[in-house]
Structure formats: structure tokens, C-alpha cells
């Protein structure tokens, strides 16, 4: 892979930059982890997904968590903060967590430190997405940032039920709440001109995606509505999705729009790729990787 970003900055393969109109977007990564392949594909039998997502001897498939940096109008916006870093050895071995890269290294590759982030967008508060919101010392990891989250998601994280509790780590959001650092939004909201969040329920109720529109181009951070390139077909809904039919409805509502717009898509967990475009297929859509 080309290690030179389009902005001309030296970076590793996981700080890949691309221009979207006036904005520079950079895909980052906070490492590789593994989850049960069956759980990742819900009711879809293994024979239909194992070529796209090969499983290991424990039936786990390889995933990444890929935060996204959007630089627009002098603002540094970080979408997702990374995988929880305080789980200890046993926790990390369950998920086969391998921090081959970190969000901090990726930011460093484009010349930024955590203090340079102005806005953090949490698509939702699961520990693989919002895990680095707060440092081990209980301080905000991005000390000069406001953290944008949906009201529904904050409520569900604070008051989880038996089916959702394992996904939330109170230490990743309670300190921000106490410090008044959340910008709580309800529904669609403009974050800065050209960047908005939109509700994408299905994975849970309060998930939001991020849509960047600049210079006639569109980029979408899909959150877990489309977790990896292998999840583009309509029916490939995850066992982890709390509301699978809602997830299907949201895909049918959004994917044709994003296809029509020729949008660049960033799925949060693709293990190998950064930027994609939709292509039509008989199962709905596929995601085709774009070269950087
Ligand atoms: Zn996720």
C-alpha cells in the first residue's frame, strides 16, 4: 500500500488521507481484534460469509476499529476514540486484541496530539468504539474536545439491560458526564457546516452515523449499520444488532441514497480497507475498496 498520503504526509498504511471537497479525512486504527464469526453474521450461514471473512480455529473473524479524523474549516473532528484500553490481559485475550497501531500513532502521523482534537463524535458508547474517551487516570483523553453523543445512547449506556450491559464500560463515559463535556444531541444535527450526524438505529437505538458533504462530494461513516465490507448485502445483519429488522429498514433507506450520491463509505470494523464505494448486486450492494 502506498505509504504517502494524498496530503503528502508520511504515514503508515493506517493513517491514509483523502480529500473530500474542502475536507481532509484520515482513517486511523486502534488495532485488530476478533469476534465470533457466527455472531457477526447473525442468521447468515457460515458458507455464505467464510470466504469474505475467514474464521480462526475458535470461529473468530478478524476486525479492526477504525476511527476517522475529519479536518474541515480549521476544526479537527475525531469520529470514535478506539478500543477500551483498561480491560486487562484476560479481557484482551478474549478479543485477541492486537494493538499493532493506535489512534495516537495515527494522529501523530498527521502531526496532531490529543489536545488538538476539537470535537469527538461517539457513534455509540460501546467499548470498542468509545473505549478511549477517558484515560486510565479518569481524565478526558482529548482534553480540549466536546464529545457528541445521542441522548438515547447516553441513557441506554447509563441504564443498560441484561442484553446490552456487557457492551458498556461506565468509566468511558461517566467522567465526561460529570465534567459536562458531552454535547448531547437528539436526532439529526449539524456539528460544523458540512458535517452532520444522523440517527442509524438497529445495532442499538441511539447509534448515529456521520455524513460529511463538501465541494459536491459525500463521505459517510456508517457506524455499525455496515460494520465491514462483508456486511454490505441487505440481509447480512449482525447477531449483535439489538433490533435486526430496524437495521434492515435503515439499510434499505440509506444505502440506495449513498449509492446515488456516489458517497465514499467508511465502515468502522473493516480489517483491511479504509475507503469504499457501493456497487449494486443482486443481494443489495457490495462495497468496493478505493485505492488511497
Ligand atoms: Zn462495533
Image (spheres, rainbow, N blue to C red):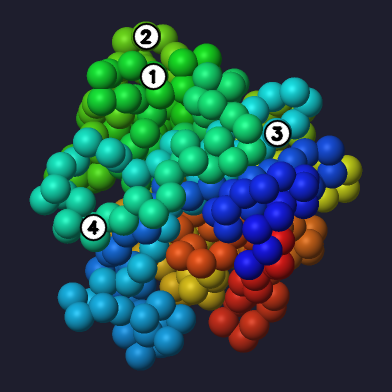
| Side (left or right) of 288 relative to 119 | right
Q: Earlier in the sequence, mark 2 or mark 4?
A: 4
Q: Earlier in the sequence, mark 3 or mark 4?
A: 3
| Side (left or right) of 261 relative to 135 | right
- The quarter of the picture where residue 61 lies is bottom left
According to the image, label 4 marks what residue? Answer: 95
Q: Residue at x 50, y 25 (%)?
A: 114
Quick one: SS at disc 4?
loop
Q: Which mark is residue 205?
A: none
Disc 3 versus disc 2: nearer the observer: 3
The local crowd at label 4, few if under 14, some if 14 to 19, many if 20 or more residues have their Cα within 10 Å, is some
According to the image, label 3 marks what residue? Answer: 71
The span from disc 4 to disc 1 (Cα, nearest Å) is: 25 Å
Q: Are marks 1 and 2 in contact (CB under 8 Å)?
A: yes
- The quarter of the picture where residue 98 lies is bottom left
Q: Earlier in the sequence, mark 1 or mark 3?
A: 3
Amino acid at each position: 500500500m502506498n505509504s504517502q498520503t494524498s496530503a503528502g504526509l508520511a504515514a503508515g498504511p493506517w493513517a491514509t488521507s483523502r480529500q473530500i471537497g474542502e475536507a481532509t479525512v484520515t482513517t486511523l486504527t486502534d488495532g485488530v481484534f476478533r469476534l465470533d464469526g457466527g455472531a457477526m453474521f447473525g442468521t447468515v450461514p457460515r458458507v455464505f460469509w467464510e470466504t469474505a471473512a475467514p474464521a480462526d480455529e475458535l470461529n473468530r473473524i478478524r476486525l479492526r476499529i477504525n476511527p476517522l479524523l475529519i479536518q474541515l474549516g480549521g476544526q479537527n473532528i475525531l469520529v470514535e476514540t478506539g478500543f477500551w484500553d483498561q480491560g486487562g490481559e484476560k479481557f484482551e485475550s478474549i478479543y485477541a486484541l492486537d494493538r499493532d497501531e493506535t489512534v495516537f500513532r495515527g494522529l501523530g502521523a498527521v502531526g496532531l496530539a490529543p489536545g488538538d482534537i476539537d470535537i469527538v463524535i461517539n457513534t455509540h458508547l460501546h467499548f470498542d468504539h468509545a473505549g478511549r474517551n477517558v484515560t486510565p487516570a479518569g481524565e478526558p483523553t482529548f482534553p480540549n474536545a466536546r464529545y457528541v453523543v445521542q441522548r438515547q445512547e447516553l441513557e441506554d449506556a447509563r441504564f443498560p439491560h441484561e442484553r446490552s450491559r456487557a457492551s458498556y464500560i461506565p468509566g468511558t463515559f461517566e467522567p465526561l458526564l460529570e465534567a459536562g463535556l458531552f454535547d448531547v444531541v437528539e436526532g439529526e444535527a449539524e456539528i460544523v457546516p458540512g458535517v452532520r450526524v444522523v440517527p442509524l438505529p438497529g445495532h442499538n437505538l441511539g447509534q448515529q452515523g456521520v455524513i460529511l458533504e463538501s465541494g459536491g462530494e459525500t463521505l459517510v461513516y456508517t457506524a455499525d449499520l455496515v460494520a465491514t465490507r462483508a456486511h454490505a448485502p441487505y440481509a447480512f445483519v449482525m447477531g449483535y444488532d439489538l433490533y435486526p429488522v430496524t437495521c434492515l429498514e435503515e439499510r434499505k433507506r440509506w444505502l440506495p441514497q449513498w449509492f446515488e450520491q456516489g458517497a465514499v463509505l467508511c465502515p468502522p470494523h473493516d480489517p483491511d480497507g479504509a475507503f469504499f464505494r457501493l456497487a449494486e448486486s443482486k443481494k443489495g450492494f457490495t462495497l468496493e475498496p478505493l485505492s488511497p
